[in-house]
Image (tube, grey):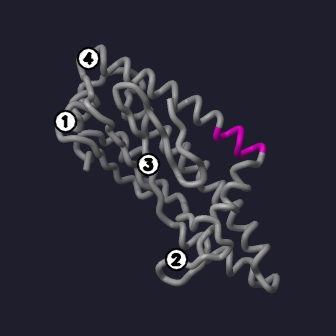
Amino acid sequence: MLSGLNSSLLSYLSPQGQDSTATNNGSAAAASKTGSPTISSAAMQRAAATTKSATAVHNLNVSQKKLGTELRAAMDKAGVHLSGAVEFSVKSDGSVDIKGSDADKAAAQAFLKADASQPNFATRIATQARDAMKLSTSIQQSAAISQAAKLARSSGGVMSLYTSLMQQSASTSVVFSVSANSSSLSYPGSLATNA
């Protein structure tokens, strides 16, 4: 956990509580581990392909590329050289986890702690995560209502199925990964975007 090191990431995202999904490899009404239906990947792809979502995905991709490029340049300037990828995983409950080799994690944490830029990189990562969570929620809601409308046998069943689908997608994480040569952003409802 990064709680003490980077409180801006945590405080920025703590009030979020966004919805998300677990995809099911395309089956229209697959059941989760608890037997409840999950949002199909086909419904997620259709929802992500709408003009509004596609524009938001594009804008988020442009932002991710810029952040990744600037973060790598700042780390390089500070003498931080990563041997592998470092993943910043931000969950909808605001918790943050860093994954990577021990040396890379320590180097990234030290860099973020010493970062005095305005806005600092921790805040920029948190903003990007928040934007990705909002987009993911929008895509999932769209997919869930479309799937519920298609599968429900009655008008009353649409809301019931929609509610069930959204409850199954109640936790998510956004993963921003950066290495010496590239960066990527992945979140439910979109393919990973790379820079």
Which residue is drawn at the image coordinates 38% and 48% (left, top)?
89
**Residue ID for mark 4:** 78
- Identify the element where label 4 is drawn: loop
Q: In this picture, which residue range is highlighted in magenta?
A: 51-57
Please name the amino acid that badge 1 sits on: Ala
Position of 67 with respect to 3 (left or right) is: right
Question: Counting residues from the N terminus, which is met first, the one under dot 1 or under dot 2?
Answer: 2
> Disc 4 versus disc 2: distance between alpha carbons?
46 Å
Q: Is residue 49 magenta?
A: no
Which residue is drawn at the image coordinates 61% and 48% (left, top)?
135
**Residue ID for mark 3:** 13
> Disc 1 versus disc 2: distance between alpha carbons?
37 Å
Question: How many residues crowd around disc 4 within 10 Å: few (fewer than 14), some, or many (20 or more)?
Answer: few
**Rendered view: 66 above or below 61:** above
**Percent x, y for residue 86?**
32, 38
> Disc 2 versus disc 3: distance between alpha carbons?
27 Å
- Identify the element where label 1 is drawn: helix
Furthest residue to the top? 77
Question: Counting residues from the N terminus, which is met first, the one under dot 1 or under dot 3?
Answer: 3
Identify the mark at residue 32; answer none if there is no mark: 2
